[in-house]
Amino acid sequence: MSHRPLPGRRSVLRGSLAASAALSLPTALGAAPAFARSGRPTAGWGVQAGDVTCDSGLVWVRSDRPARMIVETSATESFRAARRWHGPRLGPGTDFTGTTRLRGLPSGEQIHYRVLLADPDDPRRTGEPVTGTFRTASAKRRDGVRFVWSGDLAGQGWGINPEFGGYTIYNAMAALDPDFFLCSGDTVYADGPITETVALPGGRTWRNVTTEEKAKVAETLGEFRGNFRYNLLDENLRAFNARVPSIVQWDDHEVTNNWYPGEILTDARYTEKRVDVLAARARRAFSEYFPISTLRRPGGRVHRVQHHGPLLDVFVLDMRTYRNANSPNDQPVDPQGILGHEQLQWLKRELSRSRAVWKVIASDMPIGLVVPDAPNIEAVAQGDPGKPLGRELQIAELLRFVKHRRITGTVWLTADVHHTSAQHYQPSKAVFSDFEPFWEFVSGPLNAGAFPANALDGTFGPDRVFVKAPTTANVSPAGGFQFFGEVDVDGHSGELTVRLREQDGTVLFTQVLQPGRVGQ
């Protein structure tokens, strides 16, 4: 890795970000938002950055009341000669959240920013500024790229536990000084209520922070919004957000378990049974709580390409919005598949256009691991090691396309299955062999139940080179098995190194890939 030195960055973060994390939240963390209504607007939920490119970035904030968003940027922590950006008015229509696009930023530089919230009727009255920082992508290959990825937060009833230190995995990720964080879905568990206590093995007790919105499955827009606010009660996450920009995708638990368009629920916990209604509300809340510009446009979408200089393009997939219904997944013809026809064509087109050395395919579900939705199939593989069937047909088409167009440097990253592993897909071991070898790396959860490793499907010839998973289901974060991954692209050699790490940052597995190859 060849990042230039960043003098003073860590000392800045120790001061300004600690102050940011300490801004006023509800006195009882479990309470719904209850900021004092007197005085000036406050931003106790912290700040986030996203959509960071070589010359731009998107900054997010949430106010406690109507306010005008103002962002100031500077090359230094002193904010001398600061540049000011006037953002939107924040109100109840977006749950008092908003974003401001920063343009014309210097490439490959540390950007210090602070968000001020002004009284919309008196712009001279502003709240305490909230400070953050991010590094723009470098236009110079030699500067390299480093990022981390994982997914699955506050699942299976394991929420913010102050006695456990909260979401401590974010501290381990921040310590690597990544350029960004790829969140691979299940950013919330809208279908997973959080109770005050959960029994642990050996007579111990897990104690959760609780809120009203997390006491039941989310159905209303307010309840979905409350799920996103819940995670921001964790000071580790708020400090991480203020330091590391994100690329975020969604999966099923932003809505409900294993959902697909058109589904009618039979779950007795829900009064609203129409998944399409729930998904629309969840999508709106998701777009309000993350800095994703493509979701805020007319006809907004989750799938997109994030360009990060000459070394890296990240292709963010959406395996929820366009999928067909879950089924045994053994149909001989399946044009809709898990991506839908239009998204597949978009992905093929963008991959063929990419000139980046590495093309990371951010998939919210694994390719060769069998993920059941009994008696149906939830992901791509259905356990039949024979020729491609069902959703496998679409993946086979994509893999064939990558081979015949000689698209170099593709790597698949995912989460979803609550363990960590590395799979090498080899045509010599596959029934369907019209593709070049490739790697798929799995990491997660961030803070959720851990589960045994899923079975492999032999259709695309996966070899599980590494795996770490518990032998029993729903192991709590106190029992370990919380994981994240790191990707480090060297600016000189172009080598891409993947490291699978435990919650405290310990390296479990390392794989080095060479640039310029169609398959490896």
Image: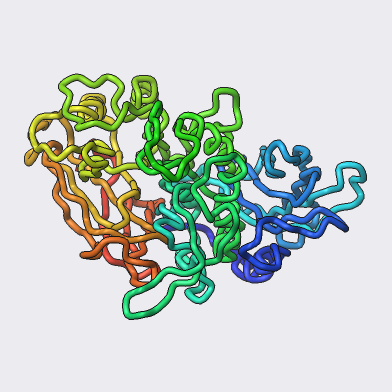
In front of the other: 314 or 24: 24
Q: Residue at x 29, y 26 (%)?
A: 337
Q: Position of residue 484 (x, y in %)?
A: 38, 59
Judge left or right: residue 232 versus residue 466: right
Q: Residue at x 16, y 47 (%)?
A: 456
Judge left or right: residue 410 versus residue 204: left
Q: Position of residue 408 (x, y in %)?
A: 28, 35
> Considering the image in quadrants, where does the N terminus appear?
bottom left
Q: How many numbered circles does the render carry? A: 0
Q: Position of residue 28 (x, y in %)?
A: 66, 67
In front of the other: 473 or 1: 473
Instruction: Give above or below for 281 relative to 262.
Output: below
Q: Residue at x 55, y 57 (%)?
A: 231
Instruction: Give above or below for 297 relative to 371.
Output: above
> Considering the image in quadrants, where does the C terminus appear?
top left
Q: Residue at x 66, y 56 (%)?
A: 32
Judge left or right: residue 202 versus residue 301: left
Residue 358 visible in this rendered orientation of the protein? no
Judge left or right: residue 236 versus residue 360: right
Display coloring: rainbow
